Amino acid sequence: MALKFPDGSIVGFATALAEPIPFTAISNGSPAVITHDGTIAKGGVLVVSSSWAAINNRVGAAGETTVGKTPLIGIDTTDPDLLRVGRGAGTVSLASTFINFSQQGELSSSGGEPQTYTGKWLEDPMGQEFQVPIGQSARQYSLQLDYDASMPWFEAAKAITRKRKPTVIRIQLPDGDIVYEYGYVHFNPGLNMQSGNPIKNAVNFYLMSSEGTLVSAP
């Protein structure tokens, strides 16, 4: 048994996404390997856009690359029933220029709740209802911050919020593992005040996939 706590983590986000790099094929494996033109540097943080919905809007890290082949660390495509062979072509976009938050308070998550269809059969005299899972609700993180407009993240978070474009969110765990998510950053520069407490800001991350990607420390 092992317990993993987020205490000591550093949350940040990418302020730049490069032009998409097309890939013509992706393997069924763990990690998935994409086929593309040119080379991608090892360790690059890549947003995946794929016709395989299960990995679309996921984030992977570039593994040991060769010309035209790059493993996507953290992306598992071994299920051929969910991920049909030969149908996953798409693009990857390199995320860069990460900005870390400091003076972080409570980090919390929400969403991911199951959504179901509820029905019953006309011919059932007992009228017994049944449920079928059909998806899950959108996920988000919320992070409290102690106000300080002189911090580099303050203006950067305002800028990424105004763009209203998704980016990579990064959570560096204290053991060296990293969690990557893809979604929208919404920073509220308004001052939250309560007597006897530091002035606060809040930032929310609205996520675009059913799960994040945990990349283990090297």
Image (cartoon, rainbow, N blue to C red):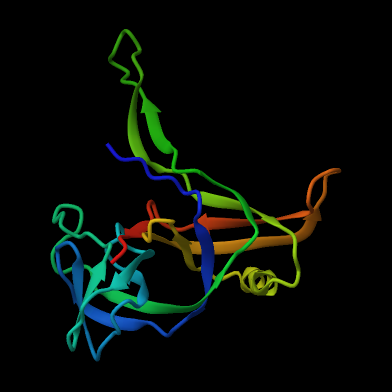
Residue at the limit of the structure toward the top, as seen here? 126
Residue drawn 23% across the image and 89% down it: 37
The C terminus lies in quadrant: bottom left
Horizontally, is 38 left or right of 214 in the view?
left
In the image, is residue 65 above or below residue 140? Answer: below
Residue at the limit of the structure toward the right, as seen here? 195
How many discs appear?
A: 0
In the image, is residue 168 above or below residue 202? Answer: below
Q: Tell which of 77 and 70 is nearer to you.
A: 70
The spot of residue 47 in percent (x, y) is 38, 71
Horizontally, is 195 left or right of 16 in the view?
right
Q: Tell which of 157 and 52 is nearer to you.
A: 157
Residue drawn 32% across the image and 71% down it: 61
The N terminus lies in quadrant: top left
Residue drawn 29% across the image and 13% down it: 124
The spot of residue 32 in percent (x, y) is 20, 67
The spot of residue 50 in percent (x, y) is 30, 69
Residue 53: which quarter of the image? bottom left
Residue drawn 44% across the image and 38% down it: 113
In the image, is residue 201 above or below residue 13? Answer: above
The spot of residue 111 in percent (x, y) is 49, 43
Q: Tell which of 175 and 83 is nearer to you.
A: 175
In the image, is residue 26 above or below residue 189? Answer: below
